[in-house]
Amino acid sequence: MSAIIEINHLKKSFGENEVLKDISTTVNKGQVLTIIGASGSGKSTFLRCINLLEKPTGGQILYKGENVLEKGYNLPKYRTHLGMVFQSFNLFANMDVLENCMTGQTTVLNRKPEEAKKIAIQNLKNVGMDQFISAKPAQLSGGQMQRVAIARALSMNPDVLLFDEPTSALDPEMIGEVLKTMQDLTKTGLTMVIVTHEMSFAKDVSDHVIFMDQGVIAEQGTAEEIFEHPKEKRTQEFLQRLRT
Ligand SMILES: Nc1ncnc2c1ncn2[C@@H]1O[C@H](COP(=O)(O)OP(=O)(O)OP(=O)(O)O)[C@@H](O)[C@H]1O
Ligand SMILES: [Mg+2]
């Protein structure tokens, strides 16, 4: 297995508040890595540090062996290799579905509009949203918006796609369609890092699971190790709380 991203001793503080304390893990090519943990444990901050929406206060992030935090590293280029899907979709409200999926391709990747359109439509097909190319986000349901957001991210051909609780803002009846879309994606060999509260989904799709507690990785391992045989008391209690 080859490492795409290696995180070494990552730290992040907001003022006095140390939110991430010495986080180390590896994201391997083709792997589905999920991050679970209580609210406030630092999951979103960790994802946001990986794609540098937040600047880490210590440690290393190696992308294909090179430290992206080193002075002079090409950060805009690094960011184009990572896609992000947010809880709140973050679609461009003034653009239709097709434009949402094209704009990054033409402005950031300098693709020609015809090529960008072809790629956008293919990805919209893959998430079952190609019937809606002329719709504006406001005309769509939450589940549909999130599937468009996934198609938009995929259209940038990321090396790694990061998801921050992609189903948490959805009405219950729409969660299934988004999880199904993500489950299909796991079979394409895409490298995915997913923060989620959907434990049965995480159990099904994860190659590797990280359980975070108060800014540290309390335990990590295979889905079976974490969900069936958690070693740490903190992990056991967290999973127990969700069951009751
Ligand atoms: N921009 C910020 N400025 C100051 N503090 C922040 C900022 N972002 C996050 N924090 C703090 O960092 C801690 C971890 O927050 P984070 O959002 O990473 O947790 P989380 O595990 O994603 O929680 P949730 O499950 O509720 O999304 C919290 O105490 C939060 O208040
Ligand atoms: Mg969060």
Image: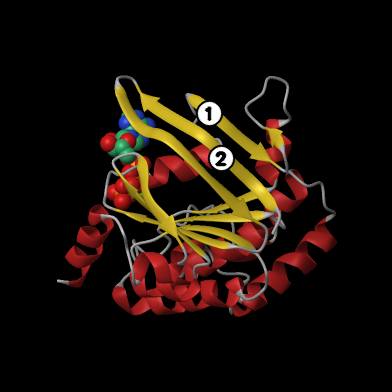
* Location of residue 180 in the rendering, given as x and y in whole percent from the top left corner: 49, 79
* Residues marked 2 and 1 touching at CB (< 8 Å): yes
Write the residue at 63% across / 46% down: 5
Compared with 227, 2 (above or below) is above
Most foreground residue, 230 or 89:
230
Residue drawn at the location 17% of the way across and 64% of the way down: 241
Splitting the image into 4 quarters, where does residue 72 fall? top right
User: Can you tell me which quadrant of the image ligand 1 is in?
Assistant: top left
Q: Say left or right for 3 vs 231.
A: right
Q: Nearer the viewer, residue 217 or 45?
A: 217
Q: Which residue is mark 2?
A: 7
Residue type highlighted by circle 1:
Gly
Task: Pick the residue in front: 179 or 67.
Answer: 67
- Residue 70 rendering spot, x and y as whole percentages: 66, 23
- Quarter that holds the N terminus: bottom right
Reading the image, the residue beneath label 1 is: 59
* Type of amino acid under label 2: Ile
Visible residue check, residue 202: no
- Give the quadrant of residue 18: top left
Res 36 visible? yes
Residue 157: percent from left, percent from top: 72, 58
Identity of the residue drawn at 24% across and 53% down: 234
Label 2 sits on a secondary structure element that is strand
Q: Is residue 169 left or right of residue 75?
A: left
Position of residue 48 measured from the top left corner of the image (x, y, whole percent) = 48, 41
For disc 2, the neighbor class at 10 Å (few under 14, some 14 to 19, many from 20) is some
At numbered mark 1, what does the secondary structure look like: helix, strand or loop? Answer: strand
* Viewer-proximal residue among 72 and 243: 243
